[in-house]
Amino acid sequence: MKTVIELQNVSFSYDLRPILENLNLEIKVRDFTAIIGPNGGGKTTLLRLILGSLQPDRGNISVFGVSPKKARFQIGYVPQHAFFDQGFPITALEVVLMGTIQANSLFFRYSPRDHLAAMQAMDALNIADLADVRYGQLSGGEKQRVLIARALVGKPKLLILDEPTASVDSRVEHDVYELLKELNGEIPILIVSHDLGFVSSYVNKVVCLNKQLEVHDVDDISKGVITNLYKSPMEMINHQCLL
């Protein structure tokens, strides 16, 4: 099976303080992978390295066989927080259209093709009827779908999400993961999450990260190892991890 992401002996530090140490990771084309671990364990830093916004101190990272910077336009990204002034008059469609803007664009105008792609992305997520609704008036679940549509409008070959359900209730969380499961039929997905119970029902691979990492099939998960990962008592299904 084709490799999408590969890390070889990757380390990274902030101001000489080690954040990630000697990471080795391989993600395949049909993987739905969850990154779990305590706050400060390096999860968002790892995503930023894969996205090419940070460079490792040591080691190599490849995405689709090239450097993360060269592959960035093949990646759809949903950040942990997307800040929009709730009173700002931007519609759901206009948020999705932002996903068509190239990083080096100084002056741009959305083309008919951009509008078509944005509406197609919204239709795929069952939110086409929200196109003209002001973003600030949407519910939490609707906002998440809009942000995922923004990430998908460029037809990426990889989708990365940083805690996409951190601010929604359990019903919306379930809907978001069901949507991601459906999308995983077409593209690999990498997701950071604290919702261990939820992700275990959807992903096939778990990356346990706390400065160092271990990778496991989801069927190998156990309460004892998750407790060791978080360094405190946790309620969790079976998983073996020695971090």
Image (cartoon, grey):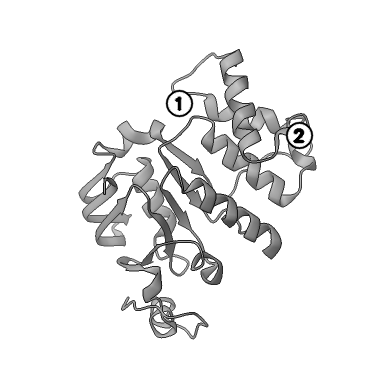
Asked whether residue 112 is in view, the answer is yes
Q: Secondary structure at mark 1?
A: loop
How crowded is the residue under tag 2: few (<14 C-alpha within 10 Å), some, or many (20+)?
few
Q: Which part of the image, by quadrant, shows the C terminus? A: bottom left
Residue under the point 45% across and 70% down: 38
Q: Could you tell me the amino acid type at mark 1?
A: Ala
- Image position, residue 163 (x, y; %): 54, 56
The image position of residue 66, as x and y in percent, is 25, 36
The residues tagged by marks 2 and 1 sit, at their Cα atoms, a distance apart of 29 Å
Residue for point 26% across, 37% down: 67
Q: Nearer the viewer, residue 173 or 140?
A: 173
In this rendering, would 46 be left or right of 133?
left
Say which residue appears at 33% left-offset and 66% top-offset: 211
Left or right position of 61 against 217: left
Residue beneath disc 1: 103
- Label 2 belongs to which residue? 129
Residue 95 percent location from the top left of the image: 64, 32
User: For the residues carrying marks 2 and 1, which lies nearer the camera in this image?
Assistant: 2
**Nearer-N-terminus badge (2/1):** 1
The disc labelled 2 sits on which kind of residue? Asp
Q: Which mark is residue 120?
A: none
Residue 222 coordinates in the image, percent (x, y) = 41, 81
Left-right relation of 196 to 207: right
Helix or strand or loop: what does disc 2 sit on? helix
Where is residue 32, by image quadrant? bottom left
